[in-house]
Amino acid sequence: MSRKSKNILTKILEHVLIYVVLFITIFPILWMLLASFEPQQSIINQANHGLFEFVPTLRNYISVFTEYNFSKYTLNSFIVAFVAIFCSLLIGLPCAYAIARFKMRKSSVVVLLVRMIPGISFLLPWFSIFSMLGLRNTYTALILSHMLVALPYIVWIMIPNFESIPMDLEEAAWIDGCTRYGAFLRVAVRLSTPGILTATLLAFIFSWNNFMFSIVLSGRSTTTLPVAVFNFVSYAYIDWGGLMAAACAITLPIVILSLCLQKYIISGLTAGAVKG
């Protein structure tokens, strides 16, 4: 076989592999989207007809936002995610900057260890502490529990971003009259925008999809979207149409944010990978 034929065969195999991976990834999302517009009885009897053979309806979405009061749960999730990420950025950015500039390797290892510990390990201590403080079923409990994972995640992503910024730029800012804090805001933070956006997006995805902390620490007035999905599942019946519509509603903000910030994600994750 000639070299040209090998190259053509390699490209064909690469494209086949890509399409297989795309199909495996996209098909469940496509099924979820189609099922969200499909009547309940049609979903149950889907084996007897094709995937696309049904009369579309908006009843599932109407039911989600009227009967199940999903708008309230959406607001709860936005409040918890926004405040948790804002506080994590407020604490995490200076922390990551200090670790990067002062070469605090032991501290970075501690951050990594905290990031690697399963979140369920903190669940019982958090439950006991918040119960004693009377903070169960409050936004405070959910925000602090989400920060437990979001904060070390942000710090770990931002350390290489700050390390990749030449120290000469900050020294020039000092000569121009900036304090270290001013140089941090005007130079380090501005040049690390892709990393900050990446860390914010990943932390938001964690908080938005978090189920474990929310089901234990939230109450009737602070229920978030992942926990609210349980409303569609009962002992003897599952509202598949409503469940798929709710899943689409939960997924939509993540998809929109990811599409808007996709050009920053790769550069944010790879910052500091190449130096010199």
Image (tube, rainbow, N blue to C red):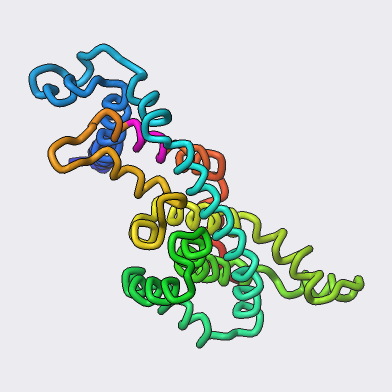
Is residue 59 left or right of 110 when viewed as pictured?
A: left
Q: Position of residue 4 (x, y in %)?
A: 28, 38
Task: In the rendered view, tell whether residue 197 sits above or below residue 110.
Answer: above
Is residue 119 left or right of 101 when viewed as pictured?
A: left
**Image quadrant in which you'd find residue 245:** top left
Nearer to us in this view, 268 or 85: 85
Nearer to us in this view, 265 or 218: 218
Q: Position of residue 267 (x, y in %)?
A: 55, 55
Nearer to us in this view, 208 or 160: 208
**Main secondary structure found in the magenta portion:** helix
- The answer to whether residue 132 is magenta is no
Task: In the rendered view, tell whether residue 204 sits above or below residue 113.
Answer: above
Residue for point 78% across, 63% down: 186
Residue for point 57% across, 53% down: 82
Q: Which residues are magenta?
A: 245-250
Residue for point 32% across, 16% down: 57
Q: Position of residue 241 (x, y in %)?
A: 27, 28
**Image quadrant in which you'd find residue 181:** bottom right
Please say whether residue 274 is visible from this viewpoint.
no
